[in-house]
Image (cartoon, rainbow, N blue to C red):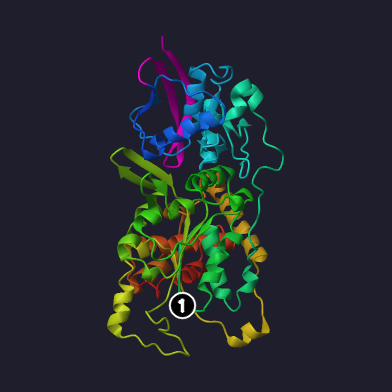
Amino acid sequence: MGSFVSINAACLRGVEAVPVTVEVAMSGGIPSIHYVGMADGSVLEGRQRVRSALRSAGYELPRKNIVVNLTPGDIRKTGTGLDLAIAVGILAGSGQIPLNGLEGALFVGELTLDAMVRPVRGEVAYQILARDTGRMLVGNWIYDHVELSGVRTGLLTGLGELKCGLGEALCAYPQGSATPPLRSVPLDYADVIGQEGAKRACVIAAVGGHGMLMIGAPGSGKTMLAQRLTTILPPIDPAVQQEALRIHSVAGEPIDGILGGERPFRSPHHTASAAGLLGGGRPVRPGEVSLAHGGVLFLDELAEYPPSVLDTLRQPLEEGCVRIVRVDGTYTFPCSFQLVAASNPCPCGYLGDPEVPCRCSIASIERYRSRLSGPLLDRIDLILSITRPDAGQVLHGEQGLSSASMAEQVQRGRAFRGWRRARENGEAESGRAGAPGVGEVALRAREEGCALAIARSQHLSARGLARLCRIARTIADLDERPDVERRHIMEASMYGAEGRL
């Protein structure tokens, strides 16, 4: 006579946890454990961990032919989080633990050789799956537990605790076990001296969600300006925050700042590959653009990135998601981020500097600038030149706009935009959080003539003219004006005409 039992488990696929049913069948024959159901190497290695854990916890390893089927069979199973469910299935099938409560639980955890349960990455994704399926998530994330609303969780630290049944073994996570919402060292725009014009551009970018490229000599403050952009953005939306938590949890990245309400800020090195930027690998994991979801992606030394890598950003910037096609299916990662980039004007960095002469030849400057393709630059709205601040201002510690005052401007600008959109189209601000569309920019005759004159003089493409109108609409919202005025168009023309490489 054989025995059969099924246990609810899960594994990661992209940034989501997919349900897996662990079916354990025991029958007579040569004692062995066989895994079927497209298990990868990390899952197959779990046979040795399960064997050792059962013995260490005082259980008997059944001397039977054990077949473990991981369904559905058309999805590749990866990771070590299936260890716990497989061990529970063997124990339940052999009658060594009670069956009560197993059906309503979702088991996720890695086993050590001494029968302890270890956490695996992706707790937030597993919690979302448990909530959607109406089950209790059972595992051990005692040191970095994340509490999501509407999710039932049970703490299981060791396999030996199941001898009296699941109900007796589980306990609630102790108070204070959740990851504390620690905030990083506070940054403030008041520390950036002598860049009031660039701060104005940062406010415009924050109000309209525009991409921004800063071009200037080394030491002009480009990185400092970019690092502080998240301090003036509005609080992150709860739905976007949960998506960002899931992505960082699956990638094994720290989530303290996101739990504390901070927007993600990612700054990959210019040696990053296309897979590191967009995602990929085996198993497929999210890249930097997805880790910046809901926040800012800062690309320093933009011209040092390989052109082939930069061009891969064009589709994510347009669609707000990354689609990675593999032989086993398509993986979709959200990546709604605000792009901020910085670059030197030339290889030596001092082209146009009033104090330090440039040492680059015309040919080297052209090669350096040609690394940035026109289609990518067309998708960056604001391009501005950054000059080094005066030495006297730095020595005297003069302060300009702070993050608090800039955040207040951003809040007023976004609030006015929401009121304007509700009045014009009956649409709430929450449904239209991105940059303004061209359809929102209704120019009067005088302003239309000004925009056309600028487009002709600067040889703007259709995309460039649309960009000019979008920036002007954002500046008008910042000034709390229902109509775009000529001065708004003139200020918008300052961003990008000279710096388009």
Relative height, residue 189 to residue 46 (above, below):
below
Residue 312 or residue 126, whichever sits in front: 126
Q: Secondary structure at mark 1?
A: strand
Q: Main secondary structure of the magenta part?
A: strand
Q: Is residue 310 magenta?
A: no
Q: Nearer the viewer, residue 89 or 274?
A: 89
Q: Is residue 450 above or below residue 19?
A: below
Kind of residue indicated by mark 1: Gly
Q: Is residue 420 left or right of residue 26?
A: right
In which quadrant of the rendered image does the C terminus lie?
bottom left
| Residue at the right extreme of this rendering | 175
Which is more toward the observer, 329 or 144? Answer: 144
Q: How many marks?
A: 1
- Say if residue 235 shows up in the picture: no
Q: Position of residue 25 (x, y in %)?
A: 41, 18
Name the image quarter holding residue 38. Answer: top left
Residue at the limit of the structure toward the top, as seen here: 1
Q: Residues within 10 Å of mark 1 (few under 14, many from 20)?
A: many
Residue that badge 1 annotates: 216
Q: Residue at x 42, y 70 (%)?
A: 301
Residue drawn at point x = 36 percent, y = 34 percent? 39
* Residue 352 sits in quarter: bottom left
Up-down relation of residue 286 to residue 55 (above or below): below
The image quadrant where one finds the N terminus is top left
Residue at image point 52% right, 78% down = 220
Residue range (magenta): 1-30
